[in-house]
Amino acid sequence: MAQDLIIQAANIEKSYGAGRSAVRVLRGIDLSVRRGEILSIVGPSGAGKSTLLNIVGCLDGFDTGRLSLIGKDVTSFSVENLATFRNLHMGFIFQMHNLLPEFDAVENIIMPLLIRRVRRREAVKKAMPLLERFGLADRAAHKPGELSGGECQRIAMCRAIIGTPEIILADEPTGNLDSQNSVLLINTLLELGRENSATVIIITHNKEIADMTGRTITLVDGRITKDSVN
Ligand SMILES: Nc1ncnc2c1ncn2[C@@H]1O[C@H](COP(=O)(O)OP(=O)(O)OP(=O)(O)O)[C@@H](O)[C@H]1O
Ligand SMILES: [Mg+2]
């Protein structure tokens, strides 16, 4: 049913640059994702995977097409409305975790809640079980510079999930970790996602991780060339 479709992208096109030097990065993307679906995006480097995820995450605009999220057409939302929408409904995990270096682990994690004006004490109370879930309880007061790359990624996952977003988007969230640790981390992320009935999209180059998701789409040269159930 249409209201079960949490993401509906129709004929999304995106180019960088203009005129003869324009690079067509997305060439007509149609993508529907059901509420609670766990989806992976695979494909060669430069295919447009991050571009697509950034568009779905309202971090980047597009040239033509329409995008609906949670039943709302966000195509012509203002920048302010998009920021609020993102804060309330979406969690994003970047390839380079993007933690704020001045703040410790807990402060980074609770940032989305502070933006929603949740009280600090209440926010910290929500962060602690998440830190425990990712085996980081003893790192709560450490700043990103004092944490390993894998630990920073786990903090970024906690930050993406703390606001119980309907949609979680992850761009190669374990890109620089070994395969075994990557699988463990993704497993925890997906578990938490399922507990909250979240819809999760993960970009990955790791076949094992793609196989952990219910559905995989392959992007090649700005087009979806394959859409399969795992
Ligand atoms: N800001 C930009 N300006 C110009 N070109 C860009 C910009 N961002 C991305 N591109 C180009 O768009 C294409 C798609 O980039 P994108 O980052 O979406 O690829 P990707 O599939 O995520 O690749 P990877 O697996 O390496 O992360 C690439 O050719 C890239 O060079
Ligand atoms: Mg990318």
Image: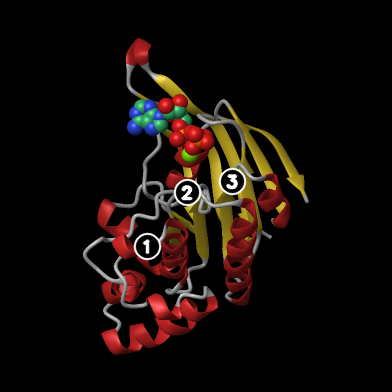
Which of the two marks, 3 or 2, is nearer to us in this view? 3
Mark 1 residue element: helix
- The quarter of the picture where residue 141 lies is bottom left
Question: Looking at the image, which is closer to me, 149 or 227?
Answer: 149
**Mark 1 lies on residue:** 85
Q: Between residues 90 and 98, which one lies in front from this camera angle?
A: 98
Are dots 2 and 1 in contact, CB under 8 Å? no
Of marks 3 and 1, the one in the foreground: 3
Q: Earlier in the sequence, mark 3 or mark 2?
A: 2
Of the residues shown, which amino acid type is indicated by label 1? Phe
Q: Which mark is residue 204?
A: 3
Question: Residue 61 at what x, y percent from top left?
Answer: 37, 41
Per the image, the residue denoted by label 2 is 56
What residue is at 66 percent from the left and 52 percent from the top? 209
Q: Secondary structure at mark 3?
A: loop
Q: Secondary structure at mark 2?
A: helix
Front residue of 63/108: it is 108
Q: Where residue 221 appears, x then y in whole percent?
A: 57, 25
How many angstroms separate mark 2 from mark 1 (CA)?
12 Å
Residue 24 percent location from the top left of the image: 46, 23
User: Is residue 130 left or right of 83 when viewed as pictured?
Assistant: right
